[in-house]
Image: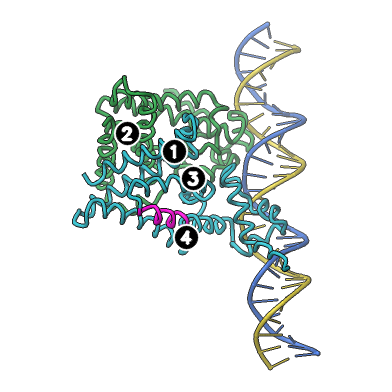
Chain colours: A green, B cyan, C blue, D yellow
Amino acid sequence: MPLAKPDPLQRVIVDAALEIASGVGPDAISMRELARQAKVSHQAPYHHFGDRAGIFAAICEEGFAILGDEMCESRNLGAEALCESYVRFALNHRGHFRVMFRTDLCDMTSYPNAAIQADRAFGILYDEVVSLVGLDADEFAIQTQTAYMWSVAHGLSTLLIDGPLLKKIGSVEDMDQLIKNVARMAISSIGV
Amino acid sequence: MPLAKPDPLQRVIVDAALEIASGVGPDAISMRELARQAKVSHQAPYHHFGDRAGIFAAICEEGFAILGDEMCESRNLGAEALCESYVRFALNHRGHFRVMFRTDLCDMTSYPNAAIQADRAFGILYDEVVSLVGLDADEFAIQTQTAYMWSVAHGLSTLLIDGPLLKKIGSVEDMDQLIKNVARMAISSIGV
DNA sequence: TATTCATACTTGACAGTGTCTAGTGCGAAA
DNA sequence: TTTCGCACTAGACACTGTCAAGTATGAATA
């Protein structure tokens, strides 16, 4: 019986970073603390990620890939489900989500792989709006409605994760119902 | 003719912090850099703000006060105008906005003055929703619709400021129209 | 007028940080 | 057997937030 191969260092480091990001927040991530948690020297993470931004880029790439996958799956259940899946991704992958939209932590234009995943996720949202408003709608209308749908999902996500909204909610069922209701209201305004 | 009284140090420091927050981002704010820009010793800021979080608390308090004022003024023009004023505040006070919802930078429960201003701003939004859905609506419905309206305004703000949305917009007029359209779509779903 | 005292600072020190430079050990290829 | 590249380690540097202690100054008080 072969021993389980130990996780490659990169995985260990990213996981440690995600744990911190999901807890205190991504700004508390320190290269030296990651090295300490991985039980390697303080310079080992640099070999794999280049610098601090490199770790955030890896998190962005992975996060947008997961978000894209989950949105893809849920789109079959309708636009409301797609909207809900965005919020649920944020709640279930808090560490990723907190990093993915922080342009100061990592400028994705310098990390093409991360940018590709981000564009893909945006494309899924865009296509969904097109399928709702019709192919013959003019470009600015589509842009507006995409921005609208994205704003609702993104706003609710950030307010639930870091904002004061969670404290105002009674139970988990309430939150579930809240997400469903907000998604329904969002879609009801689209394509009119 | 009396000499103009120099700005009190606290104001100089907060302004320097806001400039950095509005540019690179609030995480780039360093106590020593603020001291340097104010041409005082590296410990002078500590005398007025206690620690780094104290500076963020001052920014939160001021930011929520301004937001509250601007929402108050615009409410007379209707719910859509109120929604728009939220987004415009974010765009016009980027430094404040980037700090106000970052619970990791400053936990407002430790700074009652900031919390008061935040609660006031939230109250204005809440009251507006109540006036739209009617006083006899049940509590959870009001909560849901407040969360919805807040999500739209907040999501659009963050996506315009830090997200990739701004890059996809052609001109300033387009952005103005985008904000107006999104606000209209948001309000159209409320109270149905 | 002399003394006290709070306010608004300054100076110095310490541990922790990101990152540059320069190594070291080691398995595979030649 | 030697070479070579990969995955690290070790040391140093400038910078950070913050604790502790000192100083100047203007007003209040005796």
Where does label 3 land, which residue?
A25
Q: Residue A83's x, y, as percent?
A: 31, 34
Q: Say what amino acid the circle numbered 1 marks.
A: Asp
- Using the numbered discs, state the Cα–Cα distance from disc 3 to disc 1 in whole angstroms: 33 Å
Front of the two marks 2 and 1: 1
Q: Residue B188's x, y, as percent?
A: 27, 41
Q: Residue furthest front?
A: B1
Front of the two marks 4 and 2: 4
Determine the secondary structure under disc 3. Answer: loop
Where does label 2 land, which residue?
A85
Residue D9: quadrant of the picture: top right
Where does label 4 land, which residue?
B114
Looking at the image, which residue is at 55% across and 38% down? A105
A70 part of magenta stretch? no
Where does label 1 land, which residue?
B176
Determine the secondary structure under disc 4. Answer: helix
- Using the numbered discs, state the Cα–Cα distance from disc 4 to disc 2 in whole angstroms: 33 Å
Left or right of A27 in this view: B78: left
Q: Say what amino acid the circle numbered 3 marks.
A: Gly
Main SS class of the magenta portion in the image: helix
